[in-house]
Image (cartoon, helix red, strand yellow):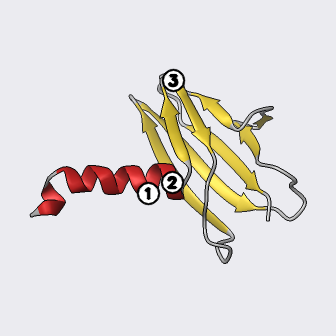
Amino acid sequence: WTWYTGSAGWMYQLLAESFFGLKRNGKRLQIKPCIPDNWSSFDIRYKFEETEYELKFEKDPAAGSIKLVLDGMEQDTSEIILVNDLINHQVHILLPV
């Protein structure tokens, strides 16, 4: 029965923040994943109010640090400013190996 109580919330927080590295602070989504070495890529659909963000994470040997491309525009930070504009957004995250 513990899964139906607060344990589910803690498990979600552990996976979202510690493993997948998604930490929301207000309207900012910070991205700093800590995934296994043998994972080359993974996808996450993140919903903010009525707006969906499709996050595609890929390891890139050429990347010296996390690179984030939001709707085709390279960002100079590893966080996303979340907006509720009812448009599906594509986010490509390149991770250093």
Residue 11, horizontal then vertical, whole percent: 33, 57
Rendered residue at 14%/52% (across/down) = 5
**In 3D space, how far apart are the residues under numbered discs 1 and 3 (Cα atoms)?**
20 Å
* Label 2 Cα neighbours within 10 Å, binned few <14 / some 14-19 / many ≥20: some
| Mark seen at residue 6 | none
Q: Nearer the viewer, residue 82 or 15?
A: 15
**Mark 2, residue position:** 18
Q: Secondary structure at mark 2?
A: helix
Identified at 14% across, 57% down, the residue is 4
Q: Are marks 2 and 3 in contact (CB under 8 Å)?
A: no
**Residues at discs 2 and 1 in contact (Cβ within 8 Å):** yes
Distance from Cα at disc 2 to Cα at disc 1: 6 Å
Looking at the rendered image, the disc whose residue lies closer to the viewer, 1 or 3, is 1
Q: Secondary structure at mark 3?
A: loop
Q: Amino acid at mark 2?
A: Ser
In this view, the residue farthest toward the left is 1
The one nearer the camera, 27 or 49, is 27
Q: Is residue 47 left or right of residue 87?
A: left
In screen coordinates, is 95 left or right of 12?
A: right
88 in relation to 32, above or below: above
Please tell me which residue is depicted at 51% across the width and 54% down the height of the picture.
18
Q: Position of residue 90 (x, y in %)?
A: 63, 42
Q: The C terminus lies in which quarter of the figure?
A: bottom right
Identify the residue under disc 1. 15
Q: Which residue, given by chain and number where applicable, does mark 3 sit on? A: 27
Image height of 51 relative to 11, above or below: above
